[in-house]
């Protein structure tokens, strides 16, 4: 009985010690590196969209990707056409806040942005929270979804 109690006490003290030394928000260097890689990719994507660089966007967008805008939802080919023809020119994107979560091979990025765009010939400036969903495919990240949600400029993303 003494051995059982001592064993239980020892096990409990180890568990308590481990709980004290680990913090839930501590990220490994690998996780931090992956997060930065995705944040950099997201930033590049905004620039490629502004530059109408279809050659860079085409391999980034998954073949089954969806794009949710204020005026509709469409697939990869339609989004590339919208960018190429200038139906929407993502002229300038100012990113204010960003939050990211990685779930194994899937990542979600939430960004609060101000988008300066030309939409069907009219210049517009709109506040959005944008949700980007990426999935690791081999060595590359593929964009599965890009959703624009119109918000007030006081909207904040909880991290």
Image (cartoon, grey):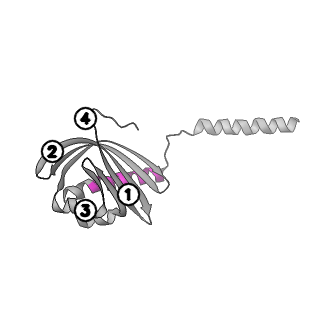
Label 4, label 3: how far apart the Cα atoms are: 28 Å
Q: Residue furthest top?
A: 154
Which structural element holds mark 4? loop
Q: Residue furthest right?
A: 1
**139 in relation to 34, above or below:** below
Label 3: how many residues lie within 10 Å, few (<14), some (14-19) or many (20+)?
some
Label 1: how many residues lie within 10 Å, few (<14), some (14-19) or many (20+)?
many
* Residue on which the image places disc 1: 144
Of the residues under marks 3 and 1, which one precedes in the sequence?
A: 3
* Residue on which the image places disc 4: 153
Which structural element holds mark 1? strand
Q: Nearer the viewer, residue 83 or 45?
A: 83
Of the residues under marks 4 and 1, which one precedes in the sequence?
A: 1
Label 2, label 3: how far apart the Cα atoms are: 20 Å
Label 4: how many residues lie within 10 Å, few (<14), some (14-19) or many (20+)?
some
Label 2: how many residues lie within 10 Å, few (<14), some (14-19) or many (20+)?
few
Of the residues under marks 1 and 2, which one precedes in the sequence?
A: 2
Residue 94 % position (x, y) = 23, 45
Q: Do residues under tags 4 and 3 come within 8 Å of each other at their CB atoms?
A: no
In magenta, the rendered stretch is 29-45
Would you say the magenta stretch is mainly helix, strand or loop? Answer: helix
**3 in relation to 147, above or below:** above
């Amino acid at each position: 009985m003494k051995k059982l109690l001592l064993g239980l006490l020892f096990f409990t003290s180890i568990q308590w010690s481990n709980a004290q030394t680990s913090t839930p928000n501590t990220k490994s260097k690998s996780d931090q590196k992956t997060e930065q890689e995705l944040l950099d990719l997201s930033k590049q994507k905004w620039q490629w969209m502004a530059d109408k660089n279809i050659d860079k966007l085409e391999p980034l967008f998954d073949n089954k990707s969806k794009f949710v805008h204020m005026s509709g939802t469409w697939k990869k080919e339609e989004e590339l056409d919208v960018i190429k023809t200038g139906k929407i020119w993502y002229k300038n994107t100012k990113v204010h806040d960003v939050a990211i979560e990685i779930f194994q091979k899937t990542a979600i990025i939430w960004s609060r942005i101000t988008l300066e765009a030309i939409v069907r010939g009219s210049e517009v400036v709109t506040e959005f929270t944008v949700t980007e969903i990426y999935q690791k495919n081999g060595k590359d990240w593929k964009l599965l979804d890009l959703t624009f949600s119109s918000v007030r400029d006081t909207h904040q993303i909880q991290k």
